[in-house]
Amino acid sequence: MDIGRPGNDPATGIIGRFAPSPTGDLHFGSLLAALASFCDARHQRGQWLLRIDDIDEPRSVPGSADAIQRTLERYGFHWDGPVRWQSNRQERYVEALSSLVESGLIFACDCSRRSLPTGQVYPGRCRHRRVSDLPVMHHALRLSLSGTVYFDDAIQGVQRFDLAVDVGDSIVWRRDGLVSYALACAVDDADQVTHVVRGADLLEGTGVQLGIIEALGLTPPIYAHLPVAVNTDGDKLSKHSRAPAISELEPVAVLQRAWQVLGQAPLTSGSVGEFWSEAIPAWDIRRVPQQRRCVV
């Protein structure tokens, strides 16, 4: 039996995923999401997919996607099937956008970021510019969102978003011709997975994605949002904050530290293989701390 493949059974219908962007090396914050999503899927004898969210080509770093895969392999992760690439799903995103246009929910927006009120939802200035056909050049396309969405997060509990007040009209297609992360992620998760485990910094974005999923008539996944790893200054560990890469660190020690941060019962493993053979059956998502941030 391969490490990390403890009899995963597609018949369970459980499909998790890890979806890094190829903008740099994996850091400890990324590992938390990978470990939790992997254990959650494998503990339920489900599948675990690796998706590279490479739709934002200007931000992608050459060689990063390959480096991410090598690091995951070194830490003992195994994914089911081939790597999924968002860049290969452009036709599906256009199909989803066309469906939203046909529903009369899309409008063209030429508001600059500078012209919008800081820290507030989009004020609806361009809602009168409804789009009835594609393509639309030199404008961002926004989805008109209203109503309320609820979901029971497996870690954070019941969440409620008033889409008009808490979220606002979301960009689904950028003025540079690229699909937005919100639309791509919403469609991919609804199409391909049943369980999404990720950082609590994306909790508000889940409201947007649920609004998109509902507008498209798709079935949403089950969500679980982990505490986000921050440094002693309170800054989120990220590529932007220059969080150190985990690629050259000793895997067992880093995995054990991540396991501890996630509130799990202590393990005694001394190798990567032993870690996964203990961790997967011992995983308990109910033990994950409910706070939004954790200092590491």
Image (cartoon, rainbow, N blue to C red):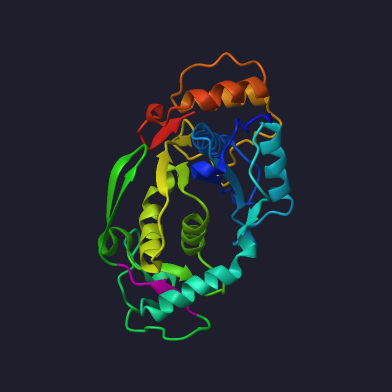
Residue 292 painted magenta: no
Classify residue 167 as left or right of residue 98: left
Question: At 25% from the left edge and 64% from the top edge, which residue is drawn?
Answer: 147
* Rendering quarter of residue 129: bottom left
* Screen quadrant of the N terminus: top right
From which residue to which does the magenta span run? 139-145
In this orientation, does residue 108 appear?
no
Residue 142 painted magenta: yes
Q: Nearest the camera: 94 or 111? A: 94
Report how many numbered discs are placed on residues in the image: 0
Q: Nearest the camera: 140 or 116? A: 140
Most extreme residue toward the top is 268
Q: Is residue 274 above or below residue 132?
A: above
Classify residue 24 as left or right of residue 154: right
Question: At 73% from the left edge and 47% from the top edge, which residue is drawn?
Answer: 66
**Residue 5: % across, % down:** 63, 33
* Rendering quarter of residue 163: bottom left
**Residue 294: % across, % down:** 43, 31
In this orientation, does residue 242 appear?
yes
* Rendering quarter of residue 119: bottom left
Most extreme residue toward the front is 11
**Residue 212: % across, % down:** 40, 64
Question: At 46% from the left edge and 69% from the top edge, which residue is drawn?
Answer: 172
**Residue 221: % across, % down:** 42, 51
